[in-house]
């Protein structure tokens, strides 16, 4: 049963964490290229207003993605714990029950999102000139929600078993397809934002289909028989118990992003376009931290399931060291090359200058951002369902209050948008560290003789 899987309960923690994280990092970067390709091609070939429309839809789109994908992540943690404990039967049962949930949830939220997206955009004070395009883009993303959710479910399960490479291959293929179709539909066929959205849906479907076929043919845990298709209330409860707080955490972050977007929208199209560009860039910045956190979650889940608590503690310490190195590199890049990177998205000099300034500001806070992901990964891996939700609440409070406080009452203007993001990371990072110290530290720290 160990083909195409990795047992992280033995061997070097650093080696396991890095070998797992690197393919996942490449995969996550390629996944972000879906959105980045849309933004670059729309921004350069259609114009700043079109880029602003895509940006205005981002927080709403992420909300519906978040509500679905947390369940898949929860299922992955449960599967990793069963795998670490050597319970192959329950690994398969987890795959089946998580899959059943992941078929129903995106259909429901995709339908809801399709219906209410125009109302949500108006609630966010989206400028009238970009509202129709933004609404159309969200509705197309809601149609593709099922494919995104199923791909992330398959990826979560494969990664839970220590296989972070397989999903990468099909994601690269579909990303290349997305870029090609973006150019064809937007540039050649002059389909505008609609063309970018259709290209993304086709690419997402391709990633899901190819990854699913591969998992079935190659990974023994996915070769399910009739006897494996047993709906278990106990397994479903474990998946939901971990997945719902993760979904709610991501959803709360998305709602808080809507609050920030409302503040941004008040400053007009130039600021919206600059904020959209920096957001897309920072989605890439998040990826090394995201994959490190995912790697630590799988590593911690397997070792916690095997009751090797000293290895969980060692993984946490090594994760912090890796994160510090990543932070130093990315901070330097954003300080010196932020303007050049922003210019990839749009040619308007005002937008480029404002975006570069925003990246220089937020890069000063990357260490706090990395701390959030490292601690969250370890806590998620050991099954701390409470923290994900609580940390989301902390971030919501910060994002609802600080942007308004800094832009209006502290006289920072649009600069306060980016400063407030960094301060929120500090608050969330301190909260994460405190949860680790009070909830997990004494349970996993080796006792000295």
Image (cartoon, rainbow, N blue to C red):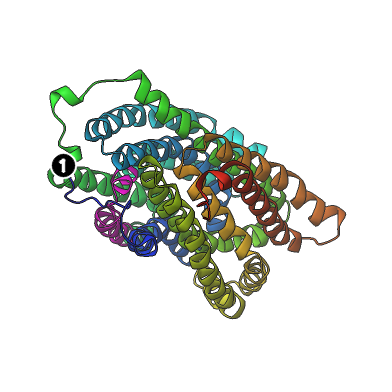
Given residues 181 and 357, the one toward you in this image is 357
Decide: few, some or many residues near mark 1? Use Cα within 10 Å; few <14, some 14-19, many ≥20.
some
Residue 195 position, x and y percent, is 38, 52
**Nearer to us in this view, 29 or 225:** 225
Q: Is residue 341 above or below residue 72?
A: below
Query: Residue 49 in the image: x percent, y percent?
Result: 57, 58
- Most common SS among magenta residues: helix
Q: Quadrant of residue 275?
A: bottom right
Task: Tell me the residue at 52%/35% (across/down).
Answer: 385
157, above or below 9, in the image: above
Residue farthest along the front direction in this orientation? 449
Name of the residue lying farthest toward the bottom: 336
Please give the residue where the numbered disc 1 appears in the rendered image.
220
- Residue 359 vertical placement versus 376 (above, below): below
Task: Please say whether residue 188 is visible from this viewpoint.
Answer: no
Total marks placed:
1
User: Which span is picked out in magenta?
Assistant: 155-180
Q: Is residue 232 visible?
A: yes
């Amino acid at each position: 049963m160990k083909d195409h899987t990795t047992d992280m309960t033995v061997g070097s923690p650093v080696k396991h964490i890095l070998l797992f994280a690197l393919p996942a990092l490449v995969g996550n970067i390629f996944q972000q290229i879906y959105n980045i390709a849309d933004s670059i091609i729309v921004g350069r070939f259609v114009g700043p207003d079109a880029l602003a429309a895509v940006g205005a839809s981002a927080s709403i789109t992420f909300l519906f993605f978040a509500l679905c994908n947390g369940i898949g992540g929860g299922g992955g943690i449960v599967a990793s714990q069963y795998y670490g404990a050597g319970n192959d039967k329950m690994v398969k049962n987890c795959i089946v029950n998580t899959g059943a949930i992941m078929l129903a949830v995106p259909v429901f939220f995709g339908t809801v999102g399709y219906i209410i997206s125009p109302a949500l955009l108006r609630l966010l004070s989206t400028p009238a000139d970009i509202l129709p395009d933004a609404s159309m883009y969200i509705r197309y993303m809601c149609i593709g929600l099922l494919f995104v959710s199923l791909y992330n479910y398959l990826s979560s399960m494969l990664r839970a078993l220590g296989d972070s490479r397989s999903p990468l291959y099909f994601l690269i293929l579909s990303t290349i397809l997305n870029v090609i179709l973006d150019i064809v539909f937007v540039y050649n066929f002059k389909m505008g934002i609609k063309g970018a959205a259709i290209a993304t849906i086709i690419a997402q479907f391709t990633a899901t289909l190819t990854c699913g076929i591969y998992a079935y043919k190659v990974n023994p845990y996915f070769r399910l028989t009739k006897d494996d298709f047993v709906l278990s209330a106990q397994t479903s409860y474990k998946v939901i118990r971990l997945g719902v707080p993760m979904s709610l955490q991501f959803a709360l972050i998305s709602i808080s992003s809507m609050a920030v977007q409302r503040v941004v929208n008040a400053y007009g199209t130039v600021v919206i376009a600059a904020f959209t560009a920096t957001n897309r860039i920072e989605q890439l910045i998040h990826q090394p931290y995201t994959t490190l956190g995912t790697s630590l979650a799988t590593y911690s889940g397997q070792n916690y399931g095997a009751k090797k608590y000293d290895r969980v503690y060692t993984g946490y310490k090594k994760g912090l060291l890796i994160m510090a190195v990543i932070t130093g590199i990315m901070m330097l890049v954003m300080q010196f090359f932020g303007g050049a990177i922003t210019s990839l998205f749009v040619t308007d000099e005002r937008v480029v200058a404002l975006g570069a300034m925003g990246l220089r500001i937020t890069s000063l806070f990357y260490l706090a951002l990395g701390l959030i992901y490292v601690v969250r990964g370890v806590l998620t891996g050991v099954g701390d369902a409470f923290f994900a939700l609580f940390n989301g609440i902390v971030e919501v409070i910060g994002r609802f209050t600080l942007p308004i406080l800094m832009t209006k009452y502290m006289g920072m203007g649009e600069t306060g948008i980016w400063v407030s993001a960094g301060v929120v990371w500090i608050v969330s990072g301190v909260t994460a560290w405190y949860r680790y110290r009070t909830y997990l530290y004494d349970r996993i720290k080796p006792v000295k003789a």
